[in-house]
Each structure stands twice: as C-alpha cells, then as structure tokens.
Amino acid sequence: MKLRVSRVQRKGRIEIIPMIDVMFFLLATFMLASLSMQHLDTLQVNLPQGQAERMSAEKTPTLTITADNRILVDKIPVTLAQLGGVLHARIGSNGNLIIAADNHAQHGTVVQAMLAAQHAGAQHFLIAVSHD
C-alpha cells in the first residue's frame, strides 16, 4: 500500500512591492490634483472678458465688488469707510491687490474702492477677468 505524501502547507505571504506601487500612484495623483487647484477668496461674480496671464500661487488679498455694489475683502463684507483699515492689515510688502468687480457693478463704486485701497498701501492692481 502506497501512502500519498500530504501537501505541504505554505504560509501566506504579503507581497509589499504591489502595495508600494499603489501608494506611489496615489501620491502622484494627489500631488497633481493639488497643483491644479487655484485659490481665490472671491464670490462668484460675472467678470468681464479679457486676456491675461495666470497668477502666481502667492497669497494676494482679493477685493470683490458684486453687481449690487457690495464690497468684500477675501469674502468678508466691509463698507467703503472700513475698507482702508481692513486692506492695510492684509496688503503685503509687494503691494498687490486683486480686483474682482462684477461686469454690472457701478463704475463709481469700483473707482472709490480702488482709491481707498491705494490709500491703504496697494501699489499694483491685478484685475480678474474671465477666459471664456
């Protein structure tokens, strides 16, 4: 009588190489997704059409003027009288300020806000436009 040799029981192994591949794939995906995000502290307004270069990633305060002539600094509502004090604390050493004025905002409100920003230390106005 011939006895069969029982199967040799092998222990399960965890393969680490495929797990490393998956982790690198996820890392690359999240890095590319985060690079494509643009951060502007504005409300949705109807911007005028125009051609302009893309902005750099440095933090620049944003002055938003809506169609109903509300004034916001980085999504914080302010009055025209408060605008100078709020902007003075936010404008950096480079003096850049993003202006995102609605296409239907009154010209006088935009000009008054820009003059108040200039008195608060803004030296360069970056006008936000739509690229449709």
Image: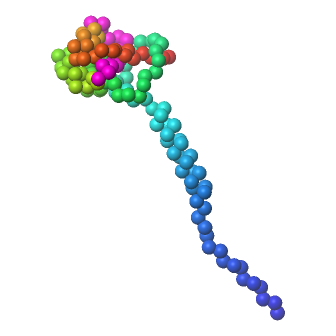
- Foreground: 75 or 20? 20
Q: Quadrant of the N terminus?
A: bottom right
Looking at this view, name the residue that lies furthest to the bottom. 1
Give the image quarter of residue 94.
top left
Q: Residue at 32% of width from left, 11% of height from top?
A: 105
Looking at this view, name the residue that lies furthest to the left. 81
Query: In this image, 111 relative to 38: left or right?
Result: left
x, y percent for residue 130: 45, 17
- Foreground: 84 or 69? 84
Q: Residue at 46% of width from left, 11% of height from top?
A: 50
x, y percent for residue 106: 30, 8
Query: In this image, 19 relative to 40: left or right?
Result: right
Q: Is residue 9 shown above or below 131? A: below
Query: In this image, 96 relative to 24: left or right?
Result: left
The residue range painted magenta reads 93-108
Query: In this image, 37 relative to 15: left or right?
Result: left
Looking at this view, name the residue that lies furthest to the right. 1
On whether residue 91 falls in the magenta region, the answer is no
Colouring chosen for the image of the structure:
rainbow
Looking at this view, name the residue that lies furthest to the top. 108
Residue 66 shows in the view = no
Residue 96 shows in the view = yes
Q: How many marks?
A: 0
x, y percent for residue 60: 34, 25
Q: Residue at 37% of width from left, 16% of height from top?
A: 126
Q: Is residue 4 shown above or below 44? A: below
Q: Residue at 41% of width from left, 12% of height from top?
A: 48
- Foreground: 48 or 15? 15
Give the image quarter of residue 5.
bottom right
